[in-house]
Amino acid sequence: MMEAVAFALYDSYRLIVTSGLPINHPIVLNEGGGEQAVAADHHGRVQCADGVGETTHGRSFGDAVLAGVALSLFPDFSVAKRWAEFVAPMEPDPRESCTVHGVFRPVQRLYEHVKEEDFAALADIRDRG
């Protein structure tokens, strides 16, 4: 399951890189896929999990920051940097990275097939029905 999350994160990372947008490193993830060292291997970069205080409440913390910015309680997302405590650095394992990148392309092709052909076929069946 976490490999699927890591693949999705890697795909997003890959799209950002190919678009030419700058990425600040280290990439910071929390909870879920962020707690899995496999995420570092997908990106081949050092990453960190983040914690708030002595415990990790990443989702709640992230939701609160998003809501605070949306409600203009915070001027921007920089509040997250001030409040987050970075813990548990994850170093990529080059051997795992090679394996992951070898698997990513076939998984990506499978997803594209399902998305473009199979979901369309299922929608056609639904619409006829």
Image (tube, rainbow, N blue to C red):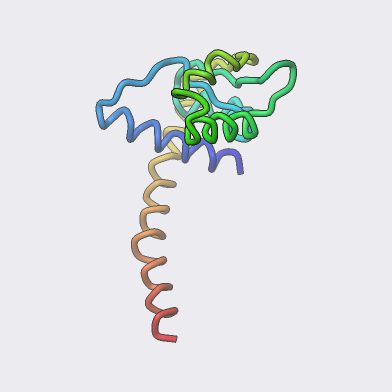
Q: Is residue 61 above or below residue 91?
A: below
Name the spot of residue 41 as percent of width and height, x first.
51, 25
Q: Is residue 18 above or below residue 115?
A: above
| Image quarter hosting the C terminus | bottom left
Q: Residue at x 48, y 38 (%)?
A: 7
Count of residue discs: 0
Apparent side of residue 91 relative to residue 22 in the rendered image (left or right): right
Instruction: State which quadrant residue 102 falls in.
Output: top left
Instruction: State which quadrant residue 52 falls in.
Output: top right
Q: Nearer the viewer, residue 86 or 118?
A: 86
Q: Residue at x 25, y 26 (%)?
A: 20
Pick out the residue farthest to the right.
54
Q: Nearer the viewer, residue 33 or 58?
A: 58
Pick out the residue farthest to the bottom.
129
Instruction: State which quadrant residue 21 falls in.
Output: top left
Name the spot of residue 84 as percent of width and height, x first.
60, 17
Name the spot of residue 117 as percent of width and height, x first.
35, 65
Apparent side of residue 92 relative to residue 11 in the rendered image (left or right): right
Q: Residue at x 40, y 17 (%)?
A: 24
Name the spot of residue 17 as percent of width and height, x first.
31, 28
| Image quarter hosting the N terminus | top right
Q: Residue at x 50, y 15 (%)?
A: 46
